[in-house]
Image (tube, rainbow, N blue to C red):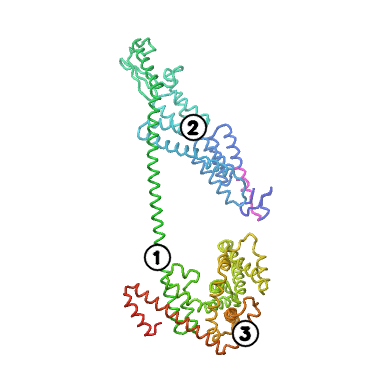
Amino acid sequence: MYCYKCGCELNKSDHCPNCGADVAAYKRIIYTSNYMYNEGLERAKVKDLSGAILCLKQSLWCNKDNLDARNLLGLVYYEIGEVVAAFSEWVISQNINNDRLHYKKNLADTYLKQFQEGSQTLENIHASIERYNHALECCYTDNLDVAALQLKKVLQLNSHYLRARQLLALLYIEDQQWARADRELHKCLLLDVNNTTTLRYLAEVNAHKKADPEAAGAGAPAAKGRRKKDGGVIKYTEDNEMIIQPVGGKRPGVDGFRFPQAITGGIIGLIVGAAAIAFLIMPARVQAVRAQSAEEVRQVSAQLDQKDATISDLQSKVDKAADKASTKSDTSKTSTANDNALMAAAGAYLTDAKDTDSITTAFDPIDPATAKDGAGAGFTSLYDALFPLVRSDMLDKYYLAGAKAYEASTPDYATTIKNLVKALEYDDASNPSQAYPQMLYYLGDSYYQSYQAADSDTQKGEMKDYLSNAKAYLQKLVKDYPKSEYVQDANNILTQIPDNVKAADIFADADDADTADSASSADSSSDASSAGSTKKTDSQTSNSAAQASSNNNASNSASAASSSQQNTQQTQSSTAASSANAGQSQQTQDAAAAQAAAQQQAEAQIAAQAQANYEAAGMTPEQAAAQVQADQAAGLY
């Protein structure tokens, strides 16, 4: 027992040991509630459910938090078929137990869980309540026969429904079927021995039995009502039906009446014939019908399969056509954008070859990896002529932006990744720049740090490819540049990446290309570097990254004239010597001639591409050529 004021456990004293409140009256109330609960429990054990309900209600009136009394009251209600009332008490008990200060195990939770798991029981209870309400409506409308049928079905679903059985007994009393009423009332007494309604109905039935012993019928069948003679007929009820029988009539097989033998023989013959048809002829007929039905089903199934195959084929063709149209549309849009960007870059280069900012800005929308995919011959030729001239500037632009973002006081790893990935696309894979190892390390570390900076496991799951990319770049650095100053830091990061993370296939295509096209790649790189070395000599920057890229171009120029077996130190010495003697006349003339040839080739490619664009717009070849000459005269390109 706990104090009603502070919740402290009470002892034998009349005052709370914690707050000092007077609990003498409170204890008497609790004792009274427990006493009434015990009284109700004893009555429930001897099937005095009406008395148990009264005692338990008094117990709850004294102490509404008496969970044992409330749970027992729900069980008593359920025993007499009052399921809704039982559920109400158990739900109230459950809520009180959840809100109280001292929680304890409550049987109401078990009762409710059992009924929620038994879906069939709940359906039966719901159906019995609906039928009982229908029976009441029928009683109000004086449709007693339908009410009796509904109540019988209610008792089939819930045989403990006391009110339904009492109402059925009352209908039998109304119809003066005393034997049936007596039987139902005795079943009611088995549920609740002291129910006042049952006892009142039973007293009335017993009174009629004493007044009319013949009606009670000690040996009369329970299914028959009282017989009445009315003139020349006898009237009696049987199973809610009025039977009218003449006084002198004879019942077949009971009062000596028999069917003639001819009729009996004919009936037997019909029965034998029907049996022969059923066992001999019908099986073959049924088998034939089944075979025919199976054949029709097979034919229909074959037709459906053929139609489904046709539909699938047509749908596949439609999907392919739609994909082809979508791909063509995307390719056309990309090709148009690349054409515009390439023309703008070529124009900027021809206007001022030293204006690297304008050239790189115009060339920026073109993706080197996919620039020539599906492009025409004119675009490809112009791109091949212009790309070697701007490659070094594009490399410097993206490398400087990425390195600046990485080396900032607060590194911007996203910007580093964006720019250095672009820079690697412009770097020559067969003869990379001196800043190549540095870019590999910056990229690998940026991917790793971005993954580590993720706030939650969900974000790390979305960025799991960052670890694969980091591993790929760092392994490339360790493998190809073992003497680089970044190798030790790269190995430290690789040890922190789990072994189950697979490196991304970033350099797979590049490695294959290096193996297959090493000779041609070296020549192309050498020519491009020779053409760009003079331009880079005049625009040297103080930044170490720009110097590395420029020195790489000078190294390529020297390697075209010297032996291919020179080491890195000799290449750097040659580059320094070439830069120091850039003023020599022979080198100046060669560089000027190469630049002039490249410029003439670029101008020719631009003019050819412009004429092709004019012809595509609807001009004749003569009109297009005239327009190109006019544009050249105006200095547009």
Give x and y (percent) for residue 540.
56, 85
Q: Are marks 3 and 1 in contact (CB under 8 Å)?
A: no
Label disc, if present, on residue 245 of the rendered structure: none
Q: Nearer the viewer, residue 471 or 389?
A: 389
Give x and y (percent) for residue 476.
62, 68
Which residue is pictured at 37% across the width and 85% down the height?
Answer: 634
Quarter that holds the C terminus: bottom left
Quarter where residue 501 is shown: bottom right
For residue 591, side relative to residue 494 (left or right): left
Q: Which residue is mark 1?
A: 329
Q: Nearer the viewer, residue 599 or 139?
A: 599
For residue 625, side relative to residue 492 (left or right): left
Give x and y (percent) for residue 364.
48, 75
* First in residue order: circle 1 vs circle 2: 2
Mark 3 and mark 1: Cα distance apart in space: 51 Å
Q: Are marks 1 and 2 in contact (CB under 8 Å)?
A: no
Q: Are marks 2 and 3 in contact (CB under 8 Å)?
A: no
Mark 2 and mark 3: Cα distance apart in space: 109 Å
Quarter where residue 109 is shown: top right
Label disc, if present, on residue 576 of the rendered structure: 3
The type of residue carrying mark 1 is Ser
Q: Nearer the viewer, mark 3 or mark 1?
A: 3
Q: Nearer the viewer, mark 2 or mark 3?
A: 3
Residue 188 drawn in magenta: no
Q: Which residue is mark 2?
A: 159
- Magenta region, main secondary structure: helix
Q: Nearer the viewer, mark 1 or mark 2?
A: 1
* First in residue order: circle 3 vs circle 1: 1
Q: Circle 2 sits in a helix, a strand or a loop, which is it?
A: loop
Position of residue 142 relative to residue 609, above or below, is above
Q: Which residues are magenta?
A: 19-33
Neighbour tally class for label 3: few under 14, some 14-19, many 20 plus, Cα within 10 Å: some
